[in-house]
């Protein structure tokens, strides 16, 4: 009979770990959390100094009974939940729920599911780290306080089923702020000038960009461009400087959760959720032919770039053998000081660098292979020498005006022999060998080009994760669930890679900003994350954080409740008649935003889309323009006569025509802008 019991979180790990530990060990899974706050109650006793009330999660009773039975028989119990705050909290809940002698229970953690790591963890068993437990418990309580008290207000104001969250509401605000910035953006005209020069003895013309004089000159319009071209007429073009140099490009750091999510989104087009799901599979174990099930990457939730000495040495030995001694990195690059990191973990890396992507290809699914290859290449590159380039920069003068051209050539590829990013693959200029100072050049062509500044880009999942990390909002384990929540709640729609706020998202964000400014304040949320780090470090008591947070939240909720009670939220009656029963239809909110419904429900269940007229005639056919939504909830303006008329605009059209070109104008903040991109006419909007 097994003497020892090991409890892990995921059933996927059971078989693998059992195989590593042998017959004396019984391995069971808790399937994640076993206790949580009750769904039907607040679960925090405010009167009794914020004592939390936990109950067994519904459906976990049989599993807990089985674990208790196994725990009673065992001499020692090893709690092997994930090596982070949440894992520590799950171990604590198991200790409470198993009802056996606490002296029998030991906490073990491993950063990778390999025989060496699992066996070593048994030897290094420790007691529970209550600071980690308290930090996770505090996070859960803060989230509960926000969700449980604010969500009912959203149900009353907008519709049932909406939710607010401490981190999700800030993420929604970040996207809303960016969308507002884009909508109010007014393009500004600027010009560029490129010169093509004939070089004696070279087949290809030399392409150079206009710089200015000894200072950079910005060209704002056609008149300024014409004046510069006129001044250059008849001038001699001469190379005044040919400068050679060297530059190095350093290898990247190995992946953290955030950088893995960003890179997988950029290069593999994976959502954050998909990346985490695949990484979890690679961490928990892959059935490798001839080896059985083994974890092929280290723990996937981390914000550290640290690598263990053994893994670092193994990587350097591998690179030295496979690529040569000169490809091995001289020193380890580290993250800048001052950045907050939970450094208990390592970066995400392969558990064995000798297990190359090609060796595992047959054992992995296509997407698992692509993600493993990305992790393997990035880790290998992080242990390699920098790439070295030879650079050449050339200045061409025409009187006082200067054109410049720069090129670089790889002298030593270093880490780039394994790992390159998008910008590394772009072809740069190739300069001929015959360029010398004092050389006269013949002009083949001068190409002036008009441009307009572009608005900031819409957030993608990758850029939102990057922003959240930079602002200190959330932690590695929260990025993917936060984004998944705001998309599934239909506050945000994802089209291609971009995230757009929906009408529902705008309404919820508006209420949150008005009634709960601190909850959606980026700095406040980042400060709360900092306090949770202090709880983890043992420098702040968890109850101090909760005691300071809840009274202010309660005050805001009570004030908002009072405000909302003053507002009688009636369904807005329209002049649209229900064709089934003759009643005037009313506007209601649904999962996709507003729609028309018959007030005779449930007797009459007639519904139809609601299109709000904006009081502007269609520039194509003269019918009314209405506010519409894409299937995913993104707003746009279209003709009510669709599909006969195909007019559409992402920006709100005005009934005013552009005096320059006759195109329709669109509203951007307090300005009217011509919808024709090449025109650039702007005027103030009349109040």
Image (cartoon, grey):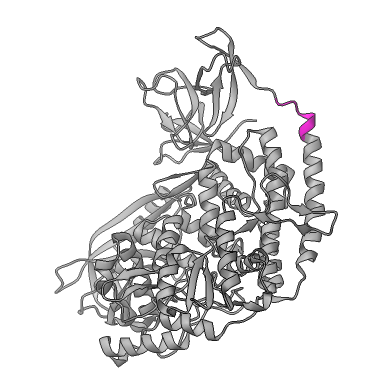
Q: Is residue 212 left or right of residue 408?
A: right
Q: Is residue 562 left or right of residue 538?
A: right
Q: Position of residue 342 (x, y in %)?
A: 59, 74
Segment colored magenta: 564-569
Q: Position of residue 375 (x, y in %)?
A: 38, 71
Q: Position of residue 571 (x, y in %)?
A: 65, 22
Number of disc labels: 0
Depth order, front residue of 215/475: 475
Residue at point 41%, 78% (across, down): 20
Q: Position of residue 260 (x, y in %)?
A: 44, 66
Which residue is outermost to the top?
582
Which residue is outermost to the right?
47
Q: Is residue 448 left or right of residue 188?
A: left
413 to 288, vertically: above or below: below
Q: Is residue 190 left or right of residue 548?
A: left
- In the rendered image, which quarter is residue 319 located in? bottom left
The quadrant in which the C terminus is found is top right
- In the rendered image, which quarter is residue 564 located in? top right
Residue at point 48%, 58% (across, down): 463
């Amino acid at each position: 009979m097994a003497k020892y019991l090991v409890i892990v979180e995921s059933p996927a790990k059971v078989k693998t770990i059992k195989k590593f530990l042998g017959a004396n060990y019984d391995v069971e899974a808790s399937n994640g959390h076993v206790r949580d706050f009750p769904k039907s109650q607040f679960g925090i006793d405010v009167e009794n100094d914020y004592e939390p009330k936990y109950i067994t999660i519904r459906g976990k009773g049989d599993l807990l009974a089985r674990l208790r039975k196994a725990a009673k028989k065992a001499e020692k119990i090893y709690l092997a939940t994930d090596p982070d705050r949440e894992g520590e909290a799950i171990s604590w809940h198991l200790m409470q729920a198993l009802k056996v002698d606490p002296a029998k229970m030991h906490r073990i953690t491993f950063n990778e599911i390999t025989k060496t790591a699992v066996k070593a963890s048994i030897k290094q068993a420790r007691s529970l780290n209550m600071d980690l437990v308290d930090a996770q418990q505090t996070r859960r309580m803060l989230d509960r306080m926000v969700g449980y008290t604010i969500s009912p207000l959203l149900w009353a104001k907008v519709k049932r089923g909406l939710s607010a969250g401490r981190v999700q509401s800030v993420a929604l605000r970040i996207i809303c702020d960016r969308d507002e910035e884009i909508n109010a953006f007014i393009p500004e005209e600027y010009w560029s000038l490129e010169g093509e020069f004939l070089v004696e003895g070279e087949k290809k013309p030399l392409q150079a960009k206009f710089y200015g004089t000894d200072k950079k000159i910005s060209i704002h319009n056609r008149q300024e461009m014409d004046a510069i071209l006129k001044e250059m007429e008849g001038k001699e073009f001469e190379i005044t400087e040919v400068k050679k140099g060297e530059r190095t490009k350093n290898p990247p750091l190995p992946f953290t959760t955030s950088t893995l999510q960003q890179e997988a989104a950029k290069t593999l087009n994976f959502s954050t959720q998909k990346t985490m799901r695949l990484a979890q599979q690679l961490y928990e174990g892959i059935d490798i032919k001839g080896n059985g099930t083994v974890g092929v990457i280290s723990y996937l939730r981390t914000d550290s770039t640290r690598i263990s000495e053994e893994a670092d040495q193994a990587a350097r030995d591998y690179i030295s053998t496979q690529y040569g001694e000169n490809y091995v990195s001289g020193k380890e690059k580290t993250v800048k000081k001052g950045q907050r990191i939970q450094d208990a973990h390592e970066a995400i890396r392969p558990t064995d660098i000798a297990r190359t992507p090609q060796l595992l290809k047959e054992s992995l699914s296509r997407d698992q292979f692509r993600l493993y290859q990305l992790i393997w290449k990035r880790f290998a590159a992080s242990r390699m020498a920098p790439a070295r380039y030879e650079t050449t920069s050339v200045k061409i003068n025409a009187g006082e005006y200067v054109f410049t051209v720069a090129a670089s050539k790889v002298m030593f590829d270093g880490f780039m022999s394994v790992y390159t990013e998008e910008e590394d693959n772009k072809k740069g200029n190739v300069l001929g060998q015959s360029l010398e100072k004092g050389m006269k050049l013949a002009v083949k062509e001068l190409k002036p080009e008009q441009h307009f500044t572009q608005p900031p880009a819409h957030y993608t999942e990758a850029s939102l994760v990057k922003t959240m990390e930079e602002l200190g909002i959330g932690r590695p384990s929260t990025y993917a669930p936060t984004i998944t929540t705001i998309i599934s709640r239909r506050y945000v729609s994802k089209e291609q890679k971009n995230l757009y706020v929906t009408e529902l998202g705008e309404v919820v964000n508006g209420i949150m900003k008005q009634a709960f400014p601190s909850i959606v304040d980026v700095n406040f949320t980042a400060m709360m994350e900092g306090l949770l780090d202090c709880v983890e470090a043992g420098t702040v008591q968890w109850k101090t954080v909760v005691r300071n947070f809840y009274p202010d939240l309660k005050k805001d909720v009570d004030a908002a409740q009072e405000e909302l009670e003053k507002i009688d939220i009636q369904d807005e009656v329209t002049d649209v008649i229900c064709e089934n029963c003759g009643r005037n239809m009313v506007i209601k909110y649904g999962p996709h935003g507003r729609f028309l419904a018959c007030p005779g429900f449930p007797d009459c269940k007639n519904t139809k889309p609601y299109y709000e007229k904006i009081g502007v005639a269609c520039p194509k056919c003269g019918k009314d323009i209405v506010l519409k939504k894409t299937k995913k909830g993104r707003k746009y303006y279209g003709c009510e006569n669709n599909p006969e008329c195909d007019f559409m605009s992402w920006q709100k059209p005005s009934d005013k025509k552009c005096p320059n070109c006759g195109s329709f104008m669109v509203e951007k903040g307090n300005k009217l802008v011509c919808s024709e991109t090449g025109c650039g006419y702007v005027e103030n909007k009349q109040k």
